[in-house]
Amino acid sequence: MKRILLPAGGAILATGLLAVGLTGTAQADGDVSRDALANSTSDAVSVASFWFGANGAALRQATQYTWDAKEVRKVVSKGGYTPDGRPGTTAPTGESKSSGSAQNVNLPKTIGKVFFVDGSGKYRWCSATSIQSNYRNLVATAGHCVYDTDSNSALLDKWIFVPGYYQGKHPWGIYVGKQAFTHYDFDTYEDYDKDYAFVTVYNGIQLERVKDVDRKTYDRFTGPKRSWGGRYHLLLVKDAGRLGDNVGGQGVAWNQPTGKPVRAFGYPAAPHPDGNKVYSGVTPKTCYGKTTAKAVGAPWLKIEEHIGLKCAVTPGYDGGPWLVNYSNAKRLGYVNGVTSTFADQDGNDRIDYITSPYFDGETAAVYNAAKNSWSGKLVTANGELYK
C-alpha cells in the first residue's frame, strides 16, 4: 500500500494526541470485511445458553488461545513509519473514579476476556476491551481472536465478551458477539499486519435466580435451564443493558506518532517457550513503556508493519489493548494497538516483546464501520431469552 506524508497543520489536542477533526480520514469501504457471529436472536440465545449451562462450566474450562512456542522468535527492525493520512481520535466514555493510591495502576473496567470455541472444539479465550461506539456495543481485540487461522475455518464459534471476568464470575454479564468487522486483508489472506477486529455485541445478560418448575414449564422455557434427579430448574436472567453503559468504552486513536508511551493490558497465561509458567491468566496484568519508533517485522508470519513494546507477558495477552494517554484516575485512554504476536529478542527462550499492528487510516475505516452498527437485546421482560 502506498503511504503519504502526514500533512502539516495537525493540531495537538489537550490529550497530547494528534488529530485533524475527530473523525479522521475515511478509507474505501473495500478495506472492511463484515461477518456474522450470531446474526439472529435465536443464534445468540443458543450461544448464551451454551456458556451459562452447567453453572458456567465451559467458562471455567476454557484455556488461553496459545501461540505455538516455535512461533516465538526475534522480530526485526524495519523502516520508519509514515502514516497513511490524517491523525484522528474518538474520545472515550464512562469515566470510572479511582479509589487506589497514586502509585498503583488502576485497572480499567473495560477490559475482559472473549470466549469462543476453536476449530478443534476446544473452549478458548483471548483478552479484549470495550471501546466507544454510537450504540455503546463495541469490543476491540485481535483479528486472530475472531477468525480461526489455525484450522482455516471461518469464524471462531460461540463468541462472547465478559468484562471483568474472574474465576467464572461475570460481574457485568456476558455479551454475545453479533458481527465482526475486520480488515479485508486479514479476513482473506490472514495478513497479520491487519490483525485487529471490532465486534458488535448484544445487550448483556445476567443470571438473576434459579426457579424450580414442573416438566411442562421446563420444556416450554426458552432460556438457560438444568435438570437432575427428576427436578427441573430454570435459570432466570435479566437484561444487563448496553456494554458501554455498564463499563464505559476506551477511545480509539490512529495515525499517531510511534515511539510514544503506551500502557498495555491483558490476561497472560501460557508458559514461556522454556516451559516456565509465570502467569495464571486469572487476573489482568499491565506493561508500560515506549513503543518502537520504527516498524518491526516477523518474516515467519509475513509481518512488515507492526510496532513493538518491551513486555514479558505470554499468550492469553492476545487481543489486549495498547492505550495511549491512559488516565489512571479515570481508567480511560485511547486504544492505539492490540497485542498480536510475541517475540524473544535476546534468544533465551523467554518472551520479552509483544507487537501490534500500527493503527492507521485503514484501521479507522474498519472501526468507523463497526461503531455505527446496532445490536439489540436478548432478554424478554419475564426473564426468558428471545427465540
Image (cartoon, grey):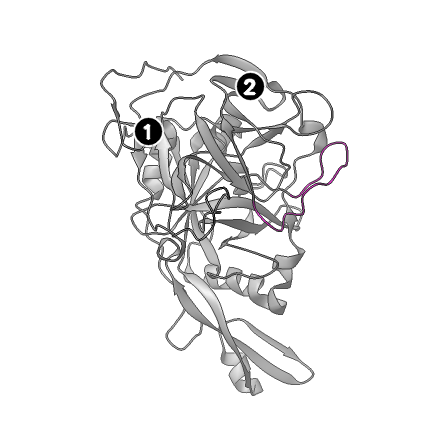
Quarter placement of the N terminus = top left
Using the rendered view, name the quadrant where residue 351 is placed: top right
The x and y percentages for residue 203 are 39, 60
- Farthest right residue? 275
Please, what is the three-letter code of the amino acid marked with disc 1?
Leu
Instruction: Report the quarter where the C terminus lies.
Output: bottom left
Q: Report the amino acid beneath label 2.
A: Gly
Prevalent SS, magenta region: loop
Crowding at label 1, few (<14), some or many (≥20) Cα neighbours within 10 Å?
many
Magenta span has 179? Answer: no
Read off the residue under disc 2. 297
Q: Which residues are magenta?
A: 269-284
Name the image quarter holding residue 273. top right
In the image, which disc is placed on residue 321? none
The residue under label 1 is 17
Please state the horizontal and vertical placement of residue 337, each as a whole percent of the image. Answer: 46, 32
Residue 273 magenta-highlighted: yes
In this view, the mark in front (2 or 1): 1
